[in-house]
Image (spheres, helix red, strand yellow):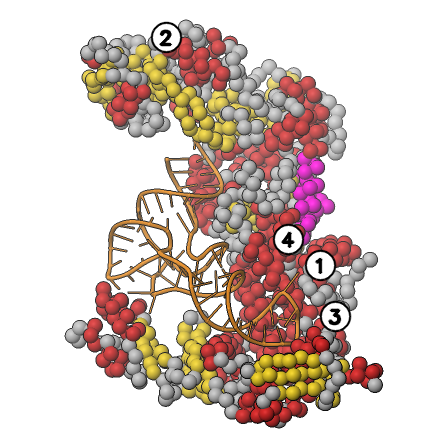
Amino acid sequence: MCLRMSRFDEVDDQYDPHAVEQRVFDYWDDVDAYEQTVEHRSDGESFFFVDGPPYTSGSAHMGTTWNKSLKDVYIRFMRMQGYDVTDRPGYDMHGLPIETKVEEQLGFENKKDIEEYGEENFIQACKEYANEQLEGLQEDFKSFGVWMDWDDPYRTVTPEYMEAAWWGFSKAADRGLVEKGHRSISQCPRCETAIANNEVEYENVEDPSIYVKFDLSEREGSIVIWTTTPWTIPANTFTAVDPEGDYVGVRAVKDGEREPRDGELLYLAEAKHEEVLKEGRYEEYEVVEELTGEELIGWSYDHPLSEEVPDHADHEGALEVYAADYVDTHGDGTGLVHSAPGHGEEDFERGRELGFPIFCPVGGDGVYTDEAGKYEGQFVKEADEEITADLDENGALLASGTVHHSYGHCWRCDTGILQIVTDQWFITITDVKDELLDNIEDSEWHPDWARDNRFRDFVEEAPDWNVSRQRYWGIPLPVWTPEDRDDDEDRIVISEREELAERVDQDIDPATVDLHKDTVDDLTITEDGTTYTRVPDVFDVWLDSSVASWGTLDFPSDDSQFDELWPADFILEAHDQTRGWFWSQLGMGTAAMGEVPYDTVLMHGHALDEDGRKMSKSVGNVVEPDEAIERHGSDAMRMFLLSANPQGDDMRFSWEEMGTMENHLRTLWNVFRFPLPYMRLDGFDPDETTLEDVDEDLELIDEWILARLQSTEAEMTDHLEEFRQDRALEALIEFVVEDVSRFYIQAVRERMWEEEDSDSKNAAYATIYRVLRESVALLAPYAPFVSEEIYGTLAGDAEHDTVHMEDWPTVEEYWQDEQLETDVAILRAIEEAGANARQQAGRKLRWPVPRVVVAADDQRTVEAVERHTALLEDRLNAREIELVSPDDRWGELNYSAEADMSELGPAFGDRAGQVMNALNEARIDEPGLEAIEAAVEDVLEDGEKIEESMVSFVTQTPDGVAGTAFGLNGDDRGVAYVDASLTDDIESEGYAREVIRRVQEMRKDLELDVEERIALEYAIDDDRIADLVAEREDLIREEVRADEMGDLEVDDGNRKEWEVEGVSMEIAIEPLAAAEASD
RNA sequence: GGGCCAAUAGCUCAAUCAGGUUGAGCGCCACUCUGAUAAGGUGGAGGCUCUCGGUUCAAAUCCGAGUUGGCCCA
């Protein structure tokens, strides 16, 4: 058992992130911290978060880690604010990527291997692989403290989830948005399936580049086309031109023996003819005709491979020139575009408009069918060479070479994709385009440009969604068609398992049926004498996650939460999901429900490497989250990730920044452990001695840190509500490091050292206790481990078992004090300036100074100093503070003027810079407009005046006194002058404190306990100094706990020579207990 | 090739929307302090604000064209 440590237990001297994590993990297990936290909020207002499911291949990388950390911070924040948050994680487990991984493992090369292995076995293997990967991801996410419902994630491979997809698809079908049709798609010939455009990866490759002449059939000459895919020439159906474009007819010869006018007649774009003829090695040519594209329309030509491909397109209207908007007379090619509606997407669309039948002599495996005549049985890319040779043979080849260009490849197996026309099933989202665009408005995006620029553009351009894949590992299409038909006229779309069981001919149990392909392929439906069989395709894997907003709720099989929760309140993913999950959910939500299925989107960026490049395995610049955790701990890693702007910008990884976060946590740890021994010693009980109880005894500094705490809470809450957790974290770090650690703790240390019980000490205890308690609550969403450990040490038994059950701290008006915050900000600025001035004057803080003169620029500063003179004296170690109000001035000063460009610009125009320099350089005895005007009169033209608003006067430090300006938020507020002159009294204290400091160091070297009494001997080599120090002997004895003074018989570490400000002294100490023992 | 986003100190970022002498933290160097101590304090070095044009008395900021990086699309 590892139950919570009791209140104010001893803690590690050093912050050790790994030890903390280990203890906290064990503790969470012991007290069921997560379960308790969820239960604690179960009556709260519901907040429906939907997890974008990571794909289950590979492990969590830095981007996934960032994503899950962001989700965790907002889920925790919402919980602390009282919401009952839906936190079911999800995993995307179907699809081609897993199929290809499994194929690799099994050594498969194509679909035949899968068929031989057996669909059922293959599907089983995919399921096992996906489940293994899921376990790995779960462990990764848990390892850095993400709290989601790990015991019950939604998995896209379960019957309930697959049913959710069927249901959505059937709703879309009900609305008439499902159809089967021919489309030009990207086909991977190895995977033998259509792949989505966003699954196509473009790579630079070398491809053939051929110019082909199509002989005109009813007139002399040829039109010239260019292509990088000779294999599509057999399917040529028409040629496209730009009707607005300029074209020429050219007569050209390759040898010098004939005149150009006797050469071949070629037609092509005016802008390209020179370049193309050069490619064709024509030596001379002559433009004999100039014409527009319009004039070419209707010209007919002969298919260049009519012999080799006897079945080529030759219907009415085929092999003619048509207008098309995809032609560019100034781009690549010739301005005449070879068009094969059986292949290219644009060609296909234009072919459909023209009402042409589609000719595609290529199968799904990329092999020519018998329609390709001579080329039947060849893989298309391998036929390029033969086709080119045949074109040459037929006299149709004008030129052939190669070209480097980017060409699409299958994202999984890297095979070059082919554009072919096949039968596919579509959700015709173009029919509801207006509705999609309207629905976009119903969601709120952070940042907003992501929605209004990027997302809208994409939705406007989006084509119909091809949802069918000719593969195995996916959700089967719930569509049954008559055995003897292959269109979509008569079809049955099943929406739920119950319905499936009722309608199929076979006996199945809806509660146990697995919906994968191997099961449902065997099921038939017979109705009205017709037998229906299932369409063998599975869904595009993007469809799986598109139904996550109801799949998360197990709807429709479980309808208990849908009405209350749907649509999602919040989703959060990276910007690549604009075209992915943000889009697929909008498409499916609109098609099925007529609504966008999410209200608020937070779109973050990607995790880049330290040089701003994307992390990639091949480059070898990947930083594994495990390594980050190992080096700095989960809390520091999370804080680093969460310190990045989550709205659209990419994050640059930085070890240094992550190390800084660990340092901040170390500072927090030191702050936290500092008061513990004192509290323990004094038996401080925060339940007995609350802040409210000690209200009367609070000192200024206590009230100040409490006011700062309120401001920090307000600021953090604002930032978090605007999805800027990075800025909220910055505010918290500033508070903990600057205000609590460097100022407050510094200021209250002496109060805690007081040995007897005191009201002041109790007030400090109660204050620091409140500050720490609320600070760790504020930190809990970011750094759940260290927050938990600190909370556990502070909280009493009657409180929550975990900090994560705490409410998000809210501002208590009673403790707010804006005036005090400003006062202290001013005092700190003065203190800082004073420290600077001291250093200039060569006077250490240990030595008092007779006076510090504060020359205030404004009344607000005067008020602050007047209100807190004692505190300032203390912090500056000054015997006296002298305040010079803005109306007066300190006699010994000179002045210069600082120019305000926002005033000078309008007044002096292009001479403003000149005037500014003159003002900056001027030195005057008394600040005043007349004096400064006189000093800069050289640059002023007639009638020009320096106005008061144009300048502010700045003091110049006189000799003998060190002065440093202080300011707030960039505005000067005054100057602190440190008078560092020496008196006997000051030297007496200064040297006495030097002695004290040396004794303390020796005590520490001897590892004496803080309480331990000592005997002290010291000898100073300068009689005057020795006398001065003797005046302060009581102070010395008290500070170093010396009960006895005298000659000591000790040496080595107990006796030392010191050199202090040019004076030698010898100091010896001896612990009294030891001295007595030796007596 | 197109759309969107970014570029400011060695690093991470602010200042950009509403133009006015560029700032913070971290890191580095020097000094300093020592009852939180792998801390704390003070100072310093370090910027043609990616480039080139334009608007303006005045541009990190507004406009145009590029460069580089990221995402998406072709």
Residue A689 lies, with reference to residue A851, above or below; the image says above
Report helix, strand or loop for mark 3: loop
Q: Amino acid at mark 1?
A: Val
- Residue drawn at x 45%, y 21% is A343
Alpha-carbon distance for marks 2 and 1? 80 Å
Q: Residue furthest left?
A: A942
Location of residue A196 in the rendering, given as x and y in whole percent from the top left corner: 52, 31
Q: Chain of mark 4?
A: A
Instruction: Say whether disc 4 or disc 2 marks the residue closer to the N-terminus.
Output: 2
Sort mark 2 into few (<14), some (14-19) or many (20+) by Cα contacts within 10 Å. Answer: some
From the image, tell me which residue sits under label 3: A8
Would you say A359 lies left or right of A920 here? right
Q: Which residue is mark 4?
A: A631
Query: What's the CA distance linking mark 4 and mark 2?
Result: 69 Å
Residue at position x 63%, y 55% in the image: A632
Q: Of callouts 4 and 1, which one flags the residue occurring earlier in the amino acid sequence?
A: 1
Q: Which stretch is magenta?
A: A130-155
Q: Chain for mark 3?
A: A
Front position in the image: A392 or A852:
A852
Residue A185, relative to residue A252: is it above or below?
A: below
Q: Quadrant of residue A477?
A: top right
Looking at the image, residue A262 lies above or below residue A846:
above
Q: Residues within 10 Å of mark 1 (few under 14, many from 20)?
A: some
User: Quick check: A343 above or below A781?
Assistant: above
Mark 4 vs 1: CB contact within 8 A = no
